[in-house]
Image (tube, rainbow, N blue to C red):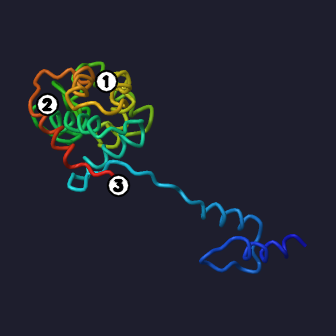
Amino acid sequence: MIKKVLPILLTILIPSTTAYSSNIGIDDVNVSVNQKKLVKKEKIWNCPSCSFEEKYVLEQLQEKTKITDRNALATIMGNIKQESMFIPNICEGGVRVPYKECYSGGYGLIQWTTVGRYNNLGKFCKNYGCDPSSLEGQTRYMINENIFQTQLPYFEGSGMTVSYYMNAAYRWLGWGIHGARSNYSYNYTNKFIFS
């Protein structure tokens, strides 16, 4: 009796753009109901004029951390741009090679330079099934790396200046040359749109 009445009740109680079949089963109902769950999309910082790589990193930073401050995100992005121009398979000096073929200097998005940090990128990707030469693998490792994690509370703060966040970026990256990272960071603050 329940199987005969259930389809009729569902057509009355659950509005849908698709008609329910009269021979719908209980398992079919669960699937249909689960597919109709609405997901609330929160506003995030976007960068319409950025490259695919920049957009990906910006999205992942917001999805995988609690960073919501435009200046903090811009500072991280400006530092990555200074280090690698968002080219994941770049070895220091500009040559583009797979992870295992960068023999000296830094490698990747943030130019992992020390032997420990470089090796940990490879170990992380081996353990979690990612490619250490890829944008996705490096972004995932970057966010989870212990050195970034120690600075994350500073980036997750709110209302501070790019200069303030630049101190956390220095502790994260330990750059030797400041370069244009501040200019890049300020440029990102002007390119980001909250939507």
Residue that carries the numbered disc 2 in the rendered image: 92
User: How far from the left and from the top, in percent, is residue 188?
Assistant: 20, 44
User: Which quarter of the rendering shows the C terminus?
Assistant: bottom left
State how far apart marks 2 and 3 are (Cα): 36 Å
Which of the labelled discs sits on residue 195, or is there none?
3
- Of the numbered discs 1 and 2, the one sitting upstream in the chain is 2
Q: Which residue is mark 1?
A: 119
Q: Quadrant of residue 48?
A: bottom left
For label 1, the crowd category at 10 Å Cα-Cα, with few meaning under 14, some 14 to 19 and many 20 or more, is some
Q: Say which element carries label 3.
A: loop
Query: Which residue is at the far front?
Result: 159
Quadrant for residue 49, please give it: bottom left
**Is the N terminus in the top left, top right, bottom left or bottom right quadrant?**
bottom right
- Label ID, residue 137: none
SS at mark 2 in the image: loop
1 or 3: tag closer to the N-terminus: 1
Nearer the observer: mark 1 or 3; the answer is: 3
Amino acid at dot 2? Glu
Q: CA distance from mark 1 to mark 2?
A: 16 Å
Look at label 3 and name its amino acid.
Answer: Ser
